[in-house]
Image (spheres, helix red, strand yellow):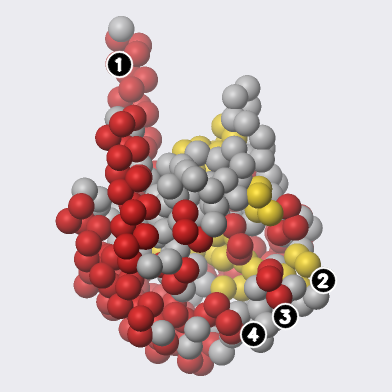
């Protein structure tokens, strides 16, 4: 099954696509999680879809068993909203609506014994009010950022975003200088800094292995040049296991990454590493 053609969130087609088939996703997600457990030691995060045309299918029933198995092996869960309406646009800017559906998803996971640790907006959508909503509900990590992205039609405005893990300014759509930082730690998709097209990102299905390696090498060189750790994520949709070429590309990339200077970590571990490094730097400055 190809997630990119069955989920109702293709901006290029004005969101006119069919909703997902949850029953098929159960087996595919379970199989992918087992692969990821073997290849990353369980250092991955699942972002279950909740959208206009499939609001709770991925937050009920056997899917919850799949998530519990993944979490038992070290994985994490996030809430992932896709607020598109076929032929009409999106609802990401509607605070009351987003709050209600987000809280419902979070409650469903928690009632199943699963604590979501992060949020991810569909199509990289993120409005400034999320900087208030997430900490108020005990979530302090976001994975919505696509550095350089500028899509006001779907509330994905990241023209001033950093290319590594950082605490979001209160209005992430504006330059950070002069702003207070929020409590939300952002882990952006890996990017080469040259734009927000698929070729610039670690989006597995929409790239080739050689290009994914190129983007990764840019990130590694950035770390070497700046002396700053680079905290990023790569993106693969569970439904894409139905495309043999895509799952093989993902497997090859995962096998290549740890042999080329990177380490798999969970989002909670990534935030902790950033905080520890910042605390050490502050202590050195105080001592000086």
Disc 1 versus disc 4: distance between alpha carbons?
53 Å
Q: Is residue 279 visible?
A: yes
- Reading the chain from its start, which is encountered first: label 1 or label 4? 4
What residue is rendered at 65% in x and 73% in y? 10
Res 132 → quadrant: top right
Disc 3 versus disc 2: distance between alpha carbons?
10 Å
Tell me, for residue 19, which label it has, or none: 4
As rendered, which of 14 and 40 lies closer to the eye?
14
What residue is rendered at 80% in x and 75% in y? 87
Q: Which residue is mark 1?
A: 284
Q: How busy is the neighbourhood of tag 3: few (under 14 within 10 Å), some, or many (20 plus)?
A: some
What is the total number of numbered labels drawn onto the structure image? 4
Q: Is there a contact, CB below 8 Å, between mark 1 and mark 3?
A: no
- Reading the chain from its start, which is encountered first: label 1 or label 3? 3
Q: Which residue is mark 2?
A: 88
Disc 4 versus disc 2: distance between alpha carbons?
16 Å
As rendered, which of 179 and 203 lies closer to the eye?
203
- Reading the chain from its start, which is encountered first: label 4 or label 2? 4
- Reading the chain from its start, which is encountered first: label 2 or label 1? 2
Secondary structure type for disc 4: loop
Disc 1 versus disc 3: distance between alpha carbons?
55 Å
Residue 287 image offset from top left, x and y in percent:
30, 9
Q: How busy is the neighbourhood of tag 4: few (under 14 within 10 Å), some, or many (20 plus)?
A: some
Tell me, for residue 16, which label it has, or none: 3
Q: Is there a contact, CB below 8 Å, between mark 1 and mark 4?
A: no
């Amino acid at each position: 099954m190809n997630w990119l053609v069955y989920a109702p969130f293709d901006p290029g087609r004005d969101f006119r696509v069919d909703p997902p088939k949850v029953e098929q996703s159960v087996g595919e997600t379970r199989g992918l999680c087992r692969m990821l457990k073997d290849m990353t030691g369980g250092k991955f995060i699942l972002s279950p879809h909740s959208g206009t045309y499939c609001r709770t299918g991925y937050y009920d029933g056997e899917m919850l068993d799949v998530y519990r198995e993944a979490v038992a092996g070290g994985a994490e869960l996030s809430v992932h909203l896709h607020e598109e309406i076929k032929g009409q646009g999106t609802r990401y800017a509607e605070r009351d609506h987003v709050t209600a559906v987000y809280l419902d998803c979070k409650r469903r996971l928690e009632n199943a014994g699963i604590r979501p640790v992060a949020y991810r907006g569909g199509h990289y959508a993120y409005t400034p009010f999320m900087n208030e909503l997430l900490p108020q509900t005990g979530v302090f990590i976001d994975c919505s950022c696509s550095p350089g992205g500028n899509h006001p039609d779907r509330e994905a405005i990241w023209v001033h975003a950093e290319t590594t893990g950082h605490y979001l300014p209160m209005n992430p759509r504006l330059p950070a200088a002069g702003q207070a930082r929020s409590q939300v730690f952002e882990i952006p998709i890996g990017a080469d800094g040259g734009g927000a097209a698929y070729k610039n990102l670690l989006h597995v299905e929409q790239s080739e292995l050689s290009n994914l390696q190129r983007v990764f090498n840019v990130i590694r060189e950035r770390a070497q040049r700046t002396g700053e750790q680079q905290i990023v994520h790569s993106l693969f949709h569970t439904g894409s296991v139905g495309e043999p070429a895509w799952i093989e590309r993902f497997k090859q990339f995962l096998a290549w990454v740890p042999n080329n200077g990177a380490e798999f970590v969970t989002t909670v571990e990534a935030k902790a590493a950033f905080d520890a490094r910042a605390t050490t730097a502050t202590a050195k400055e105080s001592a000086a």
